[in-house]
Image (cartoon, rainbow, N blue to C red):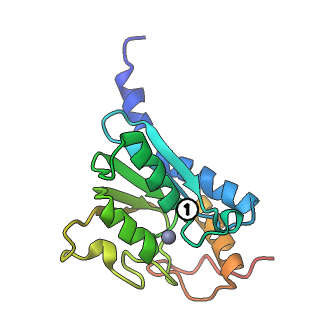
Amino acid sequence: MSDESPAFLEDLSPERFMAEALKEARRAREAEEVPVGAVIVDVESGRVVARAHNQRELLKDPTAHAEILAITQAADYYKSWRLTDCVLYVTLEPCLMCAGAIVQARIPEVVYGAVDPKAGAHCSVFEVLANSSNNHFPRVQVWVMADERAELLRGVYRERRGGGGIRGESGSTNGSTG
Ligand SMILES: [Zn+2]
């Protein structure tokens, strides 16, 4: 029982945290919200310090996106508005508001699961997260989880009565389910 480190490293893998973010997205969908989930992970400990899903309908609050709620929780955890020691995992490309909050919070790294051709603010509609003229801009990775991603996008497109192709992907996700 001496080799604990491989398991520990495995526990810090992006798959694991995207899976946690997807759990949150499912919670949003169960609550008939736009299915977006986010977690924030402390890089030192590998601990999830914030988890949230979109609650715009429940809270009747246009700012109640998963990322905003998670950022607020993480700021409470760190007792600081500067979230410089963590990674944000979110299932969908952040919107303009959330990208702004990510920049304001100085989050150094963002991993997201699907591009949002309607409202994404990393590379799709706006390029806030990739704008080097910001005083801070995070490292961004797109992390694709094939099955769940498609499932998630169907949820998004059902909600938005969608349309639009998925940038950079061949079309296995048409939005016309159910
Ligand atoms: Zn947002």
Dot 1 falls on a residue whose secondary structure is helix
Q: Within the image, what quadrant is residue 160 found in?
A: bottom right
16 vs 59, nearest the viewer: 59
Task: Give the residue at the far right of this rendering.
Answer: 178
Residue 128 image point, x, y percent: 32, 77
Q: List the residue tagged with mark 1.
A: 146
Give me the residue at 35% from left, 33% from top: 45
Q: Residue at x 32, y 41 (%)?
A: 43
Q: Amino acid type of disc 1?
A: Ala
How many numbered discs?
Answer: 1
Q: Position of residue 134 (x, y in %)?
A: 22, 73
24 in relation to 126, above or below? above
Q: Where is residue 88 in the image (x, y as percent from the top left)?
A: 41, 54
Which corner quadrant of the image does residue 47 belong to?
Answer: top left
Q: Where is residue 102 in the image (x, y as percent from the top left)?
A: 36, 63
Between 69 and 163, the one lying in front of the other is: 69
Q: Which residue in the rendered view is the most extreme toward the top?
A: 1
On-image quarter of the N terminus: top left
Looking at the image, residue 163 sits to the left or right of residue 124; the answer is: right
Instruction: Give the quarter of the image for residue 27.
Output: bottom right
Position of residue 32 in the picture relative to residue 116 (left or right)? right
Label 1, ligand 1: CB separation under 8 Å? no
Image quarter where the C terminus lies is: bottom right
**Residue 145 visible in the shown view:** no
* Residue 57 relative to residue 150: left or right: right
Is the residue marked by circle 1 packed among few (<14), some (14-19), or many (20+) residues within 10 Å? Answer: few
